[in-house]
Image (cartoon, grey):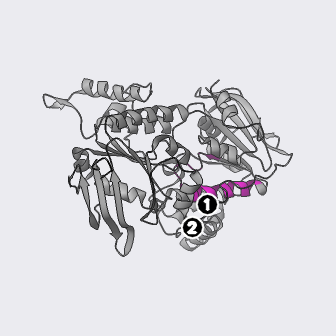
């Protein structure tokens, strides 16, 4: 209860959760009040998702009590929690690609009329949710082929139609740009005004100041600190999360060598997503690419890596044209891509870490054409150790945290000793500690003379790791900034041309 006598709409008391002998939650206490945003923060593996899953009915606690609007609360399923007024947007996209946007928004709860699905009402209500988020797309369109950012907005639109009294948002802005994030925050402000309580999970600490009323920090399954206001230094939050003083996030950036390794000449997409792109990347340079969602950044690097078709222009490596027509062309010449969606495009989740690393390196693992489990495990283990992956080679990829999954994707490609490494949103949905280690890997590559391209929606990230930054807007390059002239303002001015 607060000093003015208000009671929380949700209370957790001494919530514990164990999986066999492993205890993942250690007596969690948490209150959420109507019309407030509570930021739930912590590194991957801190227990945030487990707490969220307990509240939303996905996981049953081993012990402890919950109360919802003053009454005992123990949902046996997400549907039961949803019927009580508790909804959750998961970090991992759960959309069905073969269904329309409207069908995805209302799946499992289609509006009916005379016993059949009222498709007109469903599409009208879906369109209202899409318009609230500024998403100009037909609710009748299939989800298949939509960008990650648009899929995330659809997940959020889905939540807005729930009329829930408590919403749990798990990394809702991970795939969003500035404009999309602003629209989302406007909706959160409206939900707060309507008395909805919100638990907000994010690794983007700067946005916490914009959106949160209170901050709860978890570490190793325990609630370790609570800040009564979001107006606290980011350093204080980070140090509470990692349990130690954090001297710096970004390592020192080495100077590139004068030799040009990669050159892109007047490159245009066959899909119409970008045109007339020109830039060079030097040996040992970290070349950042920034821009708003939809600017063509991802499509550009996918084309350079041979994934998306090129209409015109050239890609040169060490002065020779190698314009790739398929991924194998780029890989053969030493250009590798770490994609933005590691789960869908970077890993086979139900396969082991060892196999995932081996799949990209069969020429090394099986030079004679014969594959042995011992050779696969040995090769993988060397790369697991090299890149600090926290896991055993026999573990499946879906059993790991997001940060370690990303390290596996990076490890499998770096094992090929590439000349150019392209990383698209390398730290999306990854905690502070794992981000720092990935930045160390990026800078370490540059120090070894590898050319690195980093695409990121996080301005602090692209500024922190890049020697130069190319900004894109509406499929065009609007400028290339040297490290000394690149800042939030100069990048956003070019991104909004």
| Rendered location of residue 95, percent (x, y) | 38, 41
Residue segment shown in magenta? 423-446
The residue beneath circle 2 is 371
In the rendered image, the vertical position of residue 430 relative to residue 273, given as above or below:
below
Q: Nearer the viewer, residue 474 or 70?
A: 70
Q: In which quarter of the image is the C terminus?
A: top right
Residue 369 relative to residue 255: left or right? left
| Rendered location of residue 10, percent (x, y) | 29, 51
In the rendered image, the vertical position of residue 435 relative to residue 27, given as above or below:
above
Q: Earlier in the sequence, mark 2 or mark 1?
A: 1
Q: Which of 281 and 34 is in front in this view?
A: 34
Residue 92 relative to residue 108: left or right? right
In the rendered image, the vertical position of residue 35 relative to residue 13, given as above or below:
above
Q: What element carries label 1?
A: helix
Residue 138 relative to residue 410: left or right? left
| Rendered location of residue 350, percent (x, y) | 44, 59
The residue beneath circle 1 is 362
CB contact under 8 Å: marks 2 and 1: yes
Residue at mark 2 to residue at mark 1: CA–CA distance:
8 Å
| Residue 18 location, quadrant | bottom left
Q: Does the magenta stretch include residue 404?
A: no
Which is the main secondary structure of the residues drawn in magenta?
A: helix
Residue 266 visible: no
What residue is at 30 percent from the left and 27 percent from the top? 125
């Amino acid at each position: 209860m607060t000093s003015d006598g208000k009671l929380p709409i949700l209370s957790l008391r001494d919530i514990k959760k164990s999986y066999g002998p492993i205890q993942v939650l250690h007596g969690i206490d948490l209150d959420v009040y109507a019309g407030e945003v509570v930021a739930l923060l912590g590194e991957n593996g801190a227990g945030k998702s487990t707490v969220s899953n307990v509240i939303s009915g996905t996981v049953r606690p081993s012990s402890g009590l919950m109360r919802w609007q003053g009454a005992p609360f123990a949902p046996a399923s997400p549907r039961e929690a949803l019927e009580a007024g508790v909804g959750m947007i998961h970090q991992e996209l759960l959309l069905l690609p073969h269904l329309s946007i409207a069908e995805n928004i209302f799946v499992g709860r289609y509006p009916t009329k005379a016993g059949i699905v009222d498709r007109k009402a469903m599409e009208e209500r879906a369109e209202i949710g899409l318009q609230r988020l500024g998403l100009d797309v037909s609710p009748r369109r299939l989800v298949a082929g939509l960008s990650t950012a648009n899929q995330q907005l659809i997940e959020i639109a889905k939540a807005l139609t729930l009329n829930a009294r408590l919403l749990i948002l798990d990394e809702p802005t991970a795939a969003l740009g500035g404009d999309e994030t602003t629209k989302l925050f406007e909706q959160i402000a409206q939900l707060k005004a309507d008395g909805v309580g919100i638990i907000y999970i994010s690794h983007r600490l700067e946005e916490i100041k914009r959106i949160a009323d209170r901050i709860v920090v978890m570490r190793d399954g325990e609630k370790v600190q609570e800040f009564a206001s979001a107006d606290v230094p980011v350093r204080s939050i980070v140090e509470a999360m990692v349990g130690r003083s954090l001297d710096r996030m970004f390592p020192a950036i080495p100077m590139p060598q004068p030799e040009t390794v990669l050159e892109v000449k007047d490159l245009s997409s066959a899909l119409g997503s970008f045109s007339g792109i020109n830039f060079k990347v030097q040996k040992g340079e970290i070349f950042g690419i920034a821009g708003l969602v939809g600017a063509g950044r991802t499509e550009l690097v996918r084309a350079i890596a041979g994934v998306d078709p090129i209409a015109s222009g050239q890609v040169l490596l060490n002065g020779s044209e190698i314009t790739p027509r398929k991924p194998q062309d780029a890989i053969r010449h030493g250009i590798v891509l770490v994609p933005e969606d590691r789960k869908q495009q970077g890993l086979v989740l139900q396969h082991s870490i060892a196999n995932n690393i081996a799949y990209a390196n069969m020429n090394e693992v099986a030079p004679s054409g014969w594959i042995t489990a011992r050779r696969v495990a040995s090769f993988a283990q060397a790369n697991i150790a090299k890149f600090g992956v926290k896991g055993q080679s026999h573990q499946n990829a879906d059993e790991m945290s997001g940060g370690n999954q990303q390290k596996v994707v990076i490890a499998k490609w770096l094992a090929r000793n590439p000349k150019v490494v392209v990383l698209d949103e390398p730290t999306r949905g990854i905690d502070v500690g794992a981000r720092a280690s990935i930045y160390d890997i990026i800078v370490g590559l540059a120090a070894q003379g590898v050319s690195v391209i980093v695409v990121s929606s996080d301005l602090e990230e692209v500024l922190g790791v890049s020697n130069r930054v190319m900004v894109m807007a509406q499929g065009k390059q609007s400028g290339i900034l040297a490290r000394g002239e690149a800042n939030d303002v100069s990048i956003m001015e070019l991104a909004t041309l």
